């Protein structure tokens, strides 16, 4: 019988007292004996510390000021002892039996460095409201389309791989998971497990439209950096214009619908410089036309077309 590897899960949190008990219970309910669970609190002023104290020795936790989510996760990972690492935000959930499935998959595929699965969207009340658009592993698609199809709450990574590629980039606040997946996948084996492993909660206090510009800026940075890393094979290096064009278009879209039309125009200019004139994406034409009407045209665009990011948040119910 194979020995069980220790699995360490880190939950970063700050003033998420409304949900953190549910997150903790979803972890403690896992039918896996070699589990280490650590909560890294950034100095909450709500009921979070009272909730954490109620779990006594069942949960390790630290509460102190930190430098943001990425910093908190890295702190927890470095403190942990597990061979397999993950992080679960303090409003998300693990499905029953997730860790057993993950460990079994790692044991069946010992060459694998990272495993991820399917993930449900849940609303504030915990009801399933949709399915994350997860896809089977394809590194080229992950990079070239500048789209993260990997649901972070379902991801488990071997410590050795993390130590090799480096921990989360603490300068990133929105796409640190996408950046990490690109770094791990560039020279490690990754496996998609077609099972629902987690629930990602959509609610009014989550990162939302206010942060849209930040997502776009980080997408450009992350994609550009991986092409400059020297770790990509020649066939992918030839796709830099395609990937950067997608990254610039995403940044333009997040800037426009986030309310900064001037910044959107800057990204659109860069996008036009990357695309093939024989294959101009329809979203690029549409967004360029919308931005031509300037800041004053944004309310009309929202009224006539609808903010696509707002539609994505429509299931954030009380």
Image: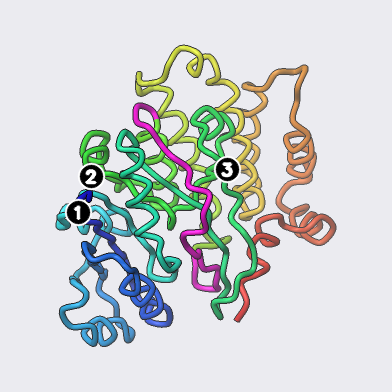
Kindly indicate whether the residue at mark 3 contacts the one at mark 2 (C-beta within 8 angstroms): no
The one of 61 and 206 positioned closer to us in this rendering: 61
Q: Residue at x 31, y 65 (%)?
A: 11
Residue 9, position in %: x, y? 28, 60
> Residue 158, how many percent across, how many down?
27, 44
Locate residue 113 relative to residue 249 in the image: left or right.
Answer: left
The circle drawn on residue 82 is 1
Q: Earlier in the sequence, mark 2 or mark 3?
A: 3
Name the image quarter holding residue 114: top left
Along the line of sight, which residue is nearer the eye, 96 or 210?
96
What is the x, y in percent for residue 105? 38, 46
Residue 159 has which mark? 2
Residue farthest front in this picture: 1
At 45% from the left and 28% from the top, the residue drawn is: 224
- Mark 3, residue position: 135
Q: How many marks?
A: 3
Image vertical order of residue 163 relative to residue 66, above or below: above
Label 1, secondary structure: give it: loop
Give the vertical position of 213 relative to 228 (above or below): below
Q: Who is closer to the viewer here, 161 or 62?
A: 161
What's the residue at 52%, 35% (across, down)?
142
Whether the magenta-drawn stretch holds residue 197 is answered as yes
Q: Which residues are magenta?
A: 186-206
As helix, strand or loop, the secondary structure at mark 3 comes to loop
């Amino acid at each position: 019988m194979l020995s069980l590897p220790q699995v360490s899960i880190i939950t970063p949190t700050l003033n998420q007292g409304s949900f953190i008990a549910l997150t903790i219970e979803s972890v403690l309910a896992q039918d896996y004996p070699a589990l280490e669970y650590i909560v890294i609190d950034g100095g909450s002023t709500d009921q979070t510390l009272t909730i954490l104290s109620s779990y006594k020795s069942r949960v390790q936790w630290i509460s102190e000021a930190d430098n943001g989510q990425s910093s908190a996760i890295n702190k927890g990972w470095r403190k942990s002892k597990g061979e397999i690492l993950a992080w679960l935000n303090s409003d998300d959930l693990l499905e029953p039996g997730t860790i057993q499935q993950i460990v079994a998959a790692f044991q069946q595929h010992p060459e694998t460095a990272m495993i991820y699965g399917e993930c449900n969207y849940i609303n504030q009340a915990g009801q399933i409201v949709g399915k994350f658009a997860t896809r089977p592993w394809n590194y080229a698609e992950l990079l070239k389309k500048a789209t993260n199809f990997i649901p972070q709450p379902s991801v488990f990574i071997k410590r050795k791989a993390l130590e090799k590629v480096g921990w989360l980039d603490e300068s990133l606040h929105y796409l640190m998971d996408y950046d990490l997946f690109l770094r791990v996948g560039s020279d490690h084996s990754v496996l998609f497990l077609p099972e629902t492993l987690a629930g990602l909660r959509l609610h009014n206090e989550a990162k939302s439209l206010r942060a849209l510009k930040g997502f776009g800026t980080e997408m450009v940075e992350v994609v550009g950096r991986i092409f400059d890393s020297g770790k990509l094979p020649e066939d992918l290096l030839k796709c830099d214009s395609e990937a950067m064009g997608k990254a610039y278009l995403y940044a333009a879209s997040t800037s426009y619908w986030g309310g900064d039309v001037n910044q959107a125009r800057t990204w659109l200019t860069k996008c036009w410089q990357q695309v093939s004139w024989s294959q101009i994406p329809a979203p690029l034409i549409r967004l360029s036309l919308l931005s031509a009407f300037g800041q004053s045209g944004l309310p009309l665009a929202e009224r006539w077309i609808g903010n696509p990011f707002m539609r994505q948040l429509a299931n954030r119910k009380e």
